[in-house]
Image (cartoon, rainbow, N blue to C red):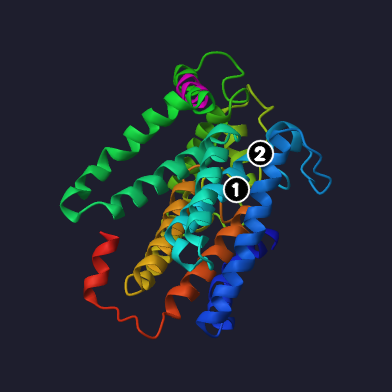
Amino acid sequence: MSSLGKYGKLLMIPLIVVLLRNRAETIYALGVFALVQIFLLVSSWMLFFHLPVPWATSPMAHIQHAAFSSYLDEGIMTAVFAGICWHLRALVPGRYGRYFAIAVVIFALVNVFFVFDGRSGHVVAIVLMSLAIMWEMPIRYRIGIVLLPFLLLLVVSILSPKVQNRVEQVRNEVQAFSLKKGENVVTGSSSGIRLHFWHRAVQSILENPVLGSGVGSWSHEFNRLERQQNSSNPNIAALGNPHQEYLQWGVQLGIPGILLILALMISILRDTLGMEKMAARAAQSALAALAVACLFNSTIYDALIGDFFCVTLGLLLALGIHAPANTHTGSGDKEQAA
């Protein structure tokens, strides 16, 4: 029941769309959302410069520079907020509103790449930057999106020692896991733990591919497989999720579960295709960030980061639905999702 309740946050997406009755209400709600995210960003920078932040509740705030959650969650949230600010910069009021939004984008991206250590946040930021650059390019040049993320990763790795170190760490951890060197290969590295969890999740899915093992069954399944196949290393703790949303749905509901979460994302994407350009691009960026984050974490299942994505998608879908009166969408707008 606890696991099932965690997915109740998905109801926030349609509830926000229904409760925001017009464009004015939606923009006010987005304004409040933006102020809260700016407060979060400023808090992180204050922690980075060792300024007093009495409202910070994270036990690792002064080490990870995340005020309320972890560097992993807040890194992803900050990257998504940067993308939203870029695409919705025209909505910021005032003569210099657009420039203020661009400044927030810059400070947010610098925060992601130079302050936070979260590799998931780095990947999400690179994906959103690639999408933003692609959408600014003429259509005939958009094939370059295939190489753009790798080019951005190279540039960011050169500029940011944190990113460079984390990329090298991933390579070493994956190599160590593949070689099975020592007993602490799995427990001693973030990548090793994930790879081990993913391996056990795939094994569970293959055993129950149609119906799955039931909601909330991950820990039970992991412990069962661990006892059967790795009795020599009983010290690996079974966490509440396998750090991969798609595999978690597969463990719980079988292959239909994986298809279900993909159908959810595709349906949200379809809803954005007829929207005005800036709202569609902002919503598609948030959806892309969710899809990427789910590859490395159980993003929807987790608290805070899962709530963030549901609220964000709800607000952006509401913005797109309540388009300005002079906006006429048609099939020509759908090319933006290509």
Three-letter code for the amino acid on which mark 2 is drawn: Ala
Rendering quarter of residue 273: bottom left
Q: CA distance from mark 1 to mark 2?
A: 8 Å
Q: Secondary structure at mark 1?
A: helix
What mark, if any, has residue 218 been given in the picture? 1
Q: Is residue 71 above or below residue 88?
A: above
The x, y position of residue 39, in whole percent, is 68, 53
Between residue 170 and residue 276, name the one nearer to us.
276
Between residue 293 and residue 19, name the one nearer to us.
19
Q: Is residue 286 magenta?
A: no
Left or right position of 299 against 66: left
Residue that protrudes farthest toward the front in the picture = 95
> Quadrant location of the N terminus?
bottom right
Question: Tag 2: Cα neighbours inside 10 Å, few (<14), some, or many (≥20)?
Answer: some
The residue range painted magenta reads 165-172
Q: Which residue is mark 2?
A: 238
The x, y position of residue 252, in whole percent, is 54, 55
Three-letter code for the amino acid on which mark 1 is drawn: Trp
The residue under the point 55% across, 59% down is: 309
The residue under the point 63% across, 63% down is: 4
